Amino acid sequence: QSVLTQPPAVSGAPGKRVTISCTGSSSNIGARNDVHWYQQLPGTAPKLLIYGNDNRASGVPDRFSASKSGTSASLAITGLQAEDEADYYCQSYDSSLSAVVFGGGTKLTVL
Amino acid sequence: EVQLVESGGGLVQPGGSLRLSCAASGFTFSRYWMSWVRQAPGKGLEWVAYIKQDGSQKYYVDSVKGRFTISRDNAKNSLYLQMNSLRAEDTAVFYCARVDTRDTDFDYWGQGTLVTVSS
């Protein structure tokens, strides 16, 4: 069981909008530790998408956005494209565990 | 261009040892915290360890404490992970990752090296 909880899968039609949630607790996201998001295309290494809760990494299109509130965070993807089909992971730091923690990952399917 | 290239993975028997290496280029290696992150087959990402710029601070996930040792050689722009007492559950792709100076994210990743622990 991951410390950060993500839905296993989400899907959406091309051009539509999807959101991926990341739920934590008072010892990680709720402790004001930043949340970061990664995209992992099939068979490749993860790639940084969003850092510091809501900042897009270099070269990431503005179709990707993220936010954080309380003990949760979310990633939104608008104008879905076939190339967005990938696994998405949230990441934070857990102050109680003194460890970096990841969500279990969410598989995005573009219908 | 930032590049991280891992090597050293392979098949090892339970209880055995393996040393992973990560060759860094395209940035001033000595200025960054570095980390290892692993991914078991078909599973999610798990942080393993990270090390401060000068090697003076090291942190590990509980499941590898006492078995794995992270180290670095700034003169060689290299990161290492010495893995001892390997278990079947350590089977994974191990990624070398650079820790962002702006925050606590991993801004660059290597392509990974597969470690398989099996008899």
Image: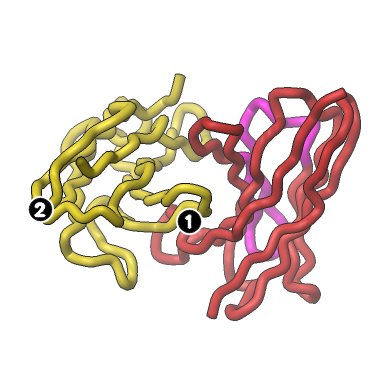
Chain colours: A yellow, B red
Choose top left, top right, bottom left or bottom right for residue B79: bottom right
Question: Residue A48 appears at what percent x and percent y?
Answer: 40, 57
* Residue type at the position of mark 2: Gly
The image quadrant of residue B109 is bottom right
Q: Mark 2 points at which residue?
A: A15
Instruction: Label 2, secondary structure: give it.
Output: loop
Residue A54 x %, y %:
22, 55
Identify the element where label 1 is drawn. Answer: strand
Task: Please tell me how crowded label 1 is: few (under 14), some (14-19), or many (20+) other residues with Cα within 10 Å.
Answer: many
Stretch of the chain drawn in magenta: B48-68
Residue in the image at 60% along x and 60% along y:
B110
Residue sticking out furthest to the top = A1
Q: What residue type is labelled 1?
A: Phe
Q: Nearer the viewer, mark 1 or mark 2?
A: 2
Which sits in the foreground, A36 or B74? A36
Left or right? Give the position of B105 relative to B15.
Answer: left
Q: Quadrant of the C terminus of chain A?
A: top left
- In space, the residues marked 1 and 2 are separated at their CA atoms by 29 Å
| Residue B85 pos. (x, y %) | 85, 28
Mark number displayed over residue B106: 1
